[in-house]
Image (cartoon, rainbow, N blue to C red):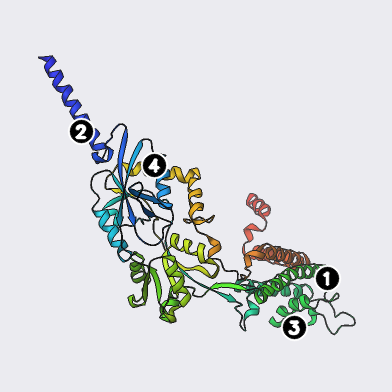
Amino acid sequence: MKGNCFLSIFYCFLIDLLVLQQAATGNGSNARLKNGEIKLRVRVPMRDGFPQFVNVVWDPSQQNYTVSGYCMDVFYAVVTRLPFNVSLHIVPFVVESNQVSRRRHAILKQMSTESEVVVGDLTIRANRSNYVDFTVPYTGSGVKMVVPVQHGRDQNMWTFVKPFSWDLWLRIIIISTFIGLAILIMERNVSALPNQEGSPNQKKLCPATILLFPISQAILPEKQVVVKSWSRFVLMVWLLLALVLMQSYTANLTSILTLDQLRPSFQNVNDLRRGGYYVGYQSGSYVYDVLIDQFKFDPSKLRPYSNITEYYDSLKLGSKNGGVAAIFDEVPYLKLYLKEYGSNYILAGPEYRNAGFGFAFPLNSNLTAYFSRGILNVIESGIMNEIEEKYFGKNEIGGEDSSAEISSAPLSLSFHSFAGLFIIAGISTLLALLISERFICQRLILTAKAFTQRYVPHFSNPVQDSTHGTVA
């Protein structure tokens, strides 16, 4: 009797263990093994345009499809790093150029519980995650615009102030005023110098004198303009600072006036919107919704294109001649465009960020985690760089290529570049002023002591107070 009870408990335990194991594996069909191998059906989009990402070609000799491209090479590299063998069955699905986003949504919704994955230039988006599970992204992305560059020199009547930023101009005025005030205080009791109409010490202590004296000495220095040694020290420190500033100003102004500058024809989305320019986007892409909802473009000003050749032709024509003034697309596609036609075009404007490209599996698929770890292994192993260089050149298609966005225009020098020199000049001037006019400090100390003795008598002579206390 006890033996039968024990066997019943044992069988119940085995059944519960099998149920728990089945639940832990998610969709059981996703983990079906045959001879130690997982059969995986790979859905690949087949469309015109951008074959560098996914290129599907029918091979009549083999009676099957040959699939290549950046996304597929990444997928194959990830498969080789899985802890189990995978048997791939490629199933292309046709996507019309004007229905890319809608067709991909339909495919994602139709993914069955069988072992399958969608591989291609598939952007990870929040609404798509309601139907499928995405792996971690294997390339960065985001929506930006590419516009023609303008050559030339951006010059106007205020070009002469551009070598320095406004904060640097303000600090030059402040340090000049401070040094002028310090010298005039130190020289105030000195008589006029011989063969001289009057030294700065005999001039009125007005704002004009305080400000113009250091500037005049920086432009036309005079040997006998000051008498005291500490005044000469302060003037020497100021002339050193002025020399560095003048040399930097001259060099940067020369660059601004002579170098050919590259800058975007449009700096931001507001310029395009206010001017009523036409802009382009990839046909069927979700970028259309971004342009309307995020960037607030008029739908009548949007023109769809299917490949980078159409991008180039439309940008070459311009908005007034039937083309567009800018192309909006995800960064990987724009980097591909710049690789082909980048000499006259540049990335510009704000960026609408997204997660990037990833592989899509059915919801609750246990394969998602394996492929995510495989992607991380491929990225860290350096193979990803080799794949990107194979299709897009040495510039990483998923990274931020700063050289494609930086203008060659010289930048204004900021205060940060000279902060150390300003600090040295300020501290040196302050110390010289304190040492030269130390009697002022002594007078302040005596005044403070007299005030203390008058209004706080019990602190003036504590020994005397204690003696009086004893006598009493």
1 or 4: mark nearer the eye: 4
* Between discs 1 and 3, the one toward the N terminus: 3
Q: Is residue 47 left or right of residue 452?
A: left
**Of all residues shown, which one is farthest toward the front?**
61
- State the residue at coordinates (41%, 45%): 375
Q: Which residue is mark 2?
A: 19
Q: Amino acid at mark 4?
A: Val
- State the residue at coordinates (54%, 61%): 402
- Alpha-carbon distance for marks 2 and 3? 98 Å
Q: Which numbered disc covers residue 204?
A: 3
Contact, mark 1 vs mark 4 (Cβ under 8 Å):
no
Foreground residue, 222 or 303? 303
Label 1: few (<14), some or many (≥20) within 10 Å? few
Q: Quadrant of residue 36?
A: top left
- Alpha-carbon distance for marks 1 and 4? 82 Å
Label 2: few (<14), some or many (≥20) within 10 Å? few
Question: At which x and y percent is residue 275?
Answer: 43, 81
Q: Amino acid at mark 1?
A: Lys
- Alpha-carbon distance for marks 4 and 2? 29 Å
Q: Which residue is mark 4?
A: 79
